[in-house]
Amino acid sequence: MDKLLLELYNGNYDITSMQDEAQEEITQKLSVLLEQVQKQIGLDLVDQLTGLYAERSGLSEFRYYQEGFRLGAKLMLAALTPV
């Protein structure tokens, strides 16, 4: 537990780097498709599109993190509350 707390404190705990095989495969397919789209509509439009998707994804991921944190806190409180 102390190691996990230390990793969290130092900012070294990052689950985003843990991609499984299915995620890697999808990332590869997206990359190929984006290259094809770029050839059709241009780099600027692709950059705008991917930028907006990334912004939306970041906001969603933070919301999921918040909700997960709250759920964890509620579970801890429920476990520590006398019946």
Image: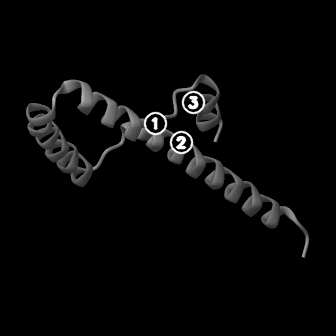
Which disc, if any, is residue 7? 3
Front residue of 40/8: it is 40
Q: Secondary structure at mark 3?
A: helix
Task: Answer whether labels 2 and 1 touch (C-beta < 8 Å).
Answer: yes
For disc 2, the marked residue is 59
**Which one is closest to the eye, mark 1 or mark 3?**
1
The scheme the figure's colours follow is one colour
- Taking the spot 22% from the left edge, 51% from the top edge, the residue there is 21
Q: With 7 as the anchor, is 44 left or right in this view? A: left
Query: Marks 3 and 2: which is nearer the front?
Result: 2
Mark 3 vs mark 2: which is more N-terminal? 3
**Of residues 47 and 21, the one drawn nearer to the viewer in this rendering:** 47
Residue 74 in percent (x, y) is at 76, 60
- In this rendering, is residue 38 above or below 22? above
**Residue 26 locus on image (x, y percent):** 21, 50
Q: Earlier in the sequence, mark 1 or mark 3?
A: 3
Read off the residue under disc 1: 55
Q: Is residue 5 above or below residue 71?
A: above
The amino acid type of the residue labelled 2 equals Leu
Q: Position of residue 23 (x, y in %)?
A: 26, 50
Name the quadrant of the N terminus. Answer: top right
Q: Residue furthest right?
A: 82
